[in-house]
Amino acid sequence: MLARRPDVLAAQRSVQAAQERVGVAQTAWFPSISLTASGGYASPDLSDLLKWSARSWGVGALLSLPLIDGGRREAGVQGANAQFDEQMAGYRQQVLVAFKEVEDQLSALRLLSEQSAVQDLAVSSARRASSLSDVRYRNGAISQLDLLDARRSELRNRRQALLVKALQYQATVALVRALGGGWA
């Protein structure tokens, strides 16, 4: 799934390009053969230009053997190999960064899930305490200030539970982004 990430894809493409450059540098060791052909008209007089005998043609071959170049070809191959190694190290680094980002978001989701469960328990306890305070207030056992304090505590716990849910949604979106945009 991480191979869909644009940064990982770009690093992979640069490794492939560096690999191609190594192949190009290695082809400098092989002999090259060039074939040429030419055709046309040649005549010393303008009046004889369109006659059959004025036609000319030629075929040529050229063979080039790399013998002595002062180490230029070997340096080119070594340079291409060094660029390939550099691109490969960059690719590995980018993959490690991608794995780190995914692992960070999975860890955040796990921790937020645990925090959400604890916060849900706190909300239900605060709700129960608020309803008990309401009953006690109606029976005259506590003051209105105590009732308001219990309701404020319930609202504070609900707000905290909503913040944890929002953080879970943000971590889920960050996970999808770290994975490269989705599961399909």
Image (cartoon, rainbow, N blue to C red):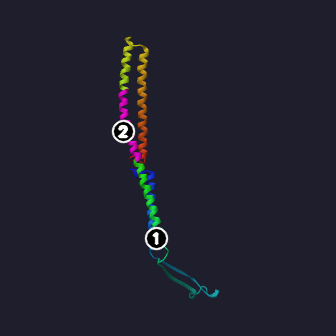
Image coordinates for residue 53, horizontal then vertical, percent? 56, 88
Query: Disc 2 residue type?
Result: Arg
Q: Secondary structure at mark 1?
A: helix
Counting other residues with Cα less than 10 Å from the Cα at mark 2, is it few (<14), some (14-19), or many (20 or more)? some
Q: Residue furthest front?
A: 70
Label whose residue precedes the other's in the sequence (2 or 1): 1
Seen from the viewer's position, the closer of residues 47 and 140 is 140
Q: Which residue is mark 1?
A: 74
On screen, residue 134 versus residue 42, left or right, reads left
Q: Residue at x 44, y 67 (%)?
A: 23
Q: Residue at x 43, y 58 (%)?
A: 88
Residue 45 among those drawn in magenta: no
Please tell me in which quadrant of the rendered image residue 81 appears: bottom left
Query: Disc 1 residue type?
Result: Glu
Image coordinates for residue 92, horizontal then vertical, percent? 41, 54
Q: CA distance from mark 2 to mark 1?
A: 54 Å
Image coordinates for residue 43, horizontal then vertical, percent? 61, 87
Residue 118 among those drawn in magenta: yes
- The region drawn magenta spans 100-122
Location of residue 46 with respect to 69 vertically, above or below: below
Image disc number at residue 182: none
Location of residue 114 with respect to 104 vertically, above or below: above
